[in-house]
Image (cartoon, rainbow, N blue to C red):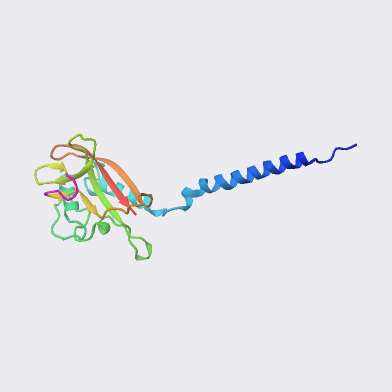
Amino acid sequence: MSRGQTVLDFAIGVSVFLIVVAFVLTVVPGMLDPFVTGSEEEPVVANRVADSLSQGRLGAPSDPYSLSVTCTTAFFAEGETGTGGPLPSECTRFENDVSHTERVGIEAHDGASYGLRIRIVADLNDDGTAQPLCDDGSALTEFSPGSCGGTSYSVGSSPPSDSGSVSVARRLVYLPDNQGMDASLLVEVW
């Protein structure tokens, strides 16, 4: 006598099959999520701008990650719209009569543009909070937003509150002029 399939065998087989299908439907979308959400361009743009600024535009290309305070102040002094005027002779690696987005060379396809904020931050008073730097003409100091009495090392608008849509590139840089300090260059793109 040959043994046929029993109800118990069938129930176990169908249960295992349904558990495997449920597991696949639950796990696979989560594994593919990083590849489908958000813009693929924003992290690339943020890294390209951070590399360009830290490896030559704000200092000498022969000494990457070491920024010239003169060139850095000239870059940030022009603000959002650019006011033109002569650049110091060692700072000819960017134009100063255009907006900051044009100065770093970003423009999205189809004429749209990215949101961009560039800041240089440091914790000079060792309170555990890095703030943007301010060049008051004699020294670099940290400042809270809106209280810089000179050139603020921050340009661009604040990113949207949905932090999932902002790509941030950070580069550790050195400012050898004045006090000689370590700082972070932050480039935020959305």
Q: Which residue is drawn at 16% across and 52% down?
A: 74
- Which is nearer the eye, 110 or 163? 163
Work out which residue is located at the far bottom of the displayed protein and give it.
110
Count of numbered marks: 0
Find out whether residue 146 is within the magenta segment: yes
Image quadrant in which the N terminus is located: top right
Image quadrant in which the C terminus is located: bottom left
Position above or below: 127 against 59: above
Find out whether residue 97 is within the magenta segment: no
Q: Position of residue 163 (x, y in %)?
A: 35, 49
Position above or below: 34 against 96: above
Q: Where is residue 159 in the image (x, y as percent from the top left)?
A: 30, 53
Q: Where is residue 119 in the image (x, y as percent from the top left)?
A: 24, 48
Work out which residue is located at the far top of the displayed protein and give it.
126
- Which is nearer the eye, 28 or 43? 28
Write down the quadrant of residue 62 in the picture: top left
Write down the quadrant of residue 177 in the picture: top left
Work out which residue is located at the far right of the displayed protein and give it.
1
Q: Which residue is drawn at 29% across and 42% down?
A: 171
Q: Main secondary structure of the magenta part?
A: loop
- Say whether residue 169 is left or right of residue 11: left
- Which is nearer the eye, 29 or 156? 29
Magenta span of residues = 143-149
Q: Which residue is drawn at 25% across and 47% down?
A: 56
Q: Which residue is drawn at 15% across and 42% down?
A: 141
- Say whether residue 2 is left or right of residue 151: right
Q: Where is residue 154 in the image (x, y as percent from the top left)?
A: 21, 50
Work out which residue is located at the far left of the displayed protein and give it.
138
